[in-house]
Image (spheres, rainbow, N blue to C red):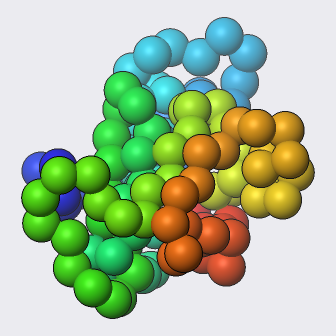
Amino acid sequence: MGTMARKIDTSDGRAALDAARGEAPARTATATAVRYLLQLVEEKAPGKSVEVRVPPFGAVQVIQGPAHTRGTPPNVVETDAATWIALATGAEKWADAMAAGRISASGVRADISDLLPVRW
């Protein structure tokens, strides 16, 4: 997985975010918005100790610490696209999404609430 191949331009990312937060967003807008927000978290907290997954759209490794190279990482955060967009934009709080069971977080470093929301 690792770093995404192509950096998403800020204007493209913001346009996709606007579209993805609308009613019945196109899959392409949702995909770009998810990847853009993952990219911003990766830029904010570079590292390899926590993997953030938003299937099927993308995953990044973030936060300084023990590097992960093979198999399932010890610290994983996984959520759906709508929840990720809500968390990353500040529309939803980490604790609320956790309580509702919309985030799967395993490992001692998997609480990334201090990285959210991101500036977009």
Query: Residue 22: percent from the left, percent from the top?
Result: 71, 24
Residue 75 seen in the current view:
yes
Q: At 86% across and 47% down in the image, what residue appears? A: 99
Residue at the bottom extreme of this rendering: 65
* Pick the front one: 3 or 30: 3
Relative to 43, is 70 above or below? above
Picture quarter containing residue 110? bottom right
Q: At 45% across and 16% down in the image, what residue appears? A: 27
Relative to 54, is 61 above or below? below
Picture quarter containing residue 3? bottom left
Q: At 62% across and 70% down in the image, what residue appears? A: 111
Q: At 41% across and 46% down in the image, what residue appears? A: 53
Relative to 16, is 8 above or below? below
* Pick the front one: 83 or 10: 83
Query: Residue 65: percent from the left, percent from the top?
Result: 33, 89
* Pick the front one: 14 or 55: 55
Relative to 24, is 4 above or below? below
Query: Residue 63: percent from the left, percent from the top?
Result: 40, 81
Quadrant containing the C terminus is: bottom right
Left or right: residue 83 compared with residue 10 = right
Residue 46 seen in the current view:
no
Left or right: residue 21 compared with residue 47 = right
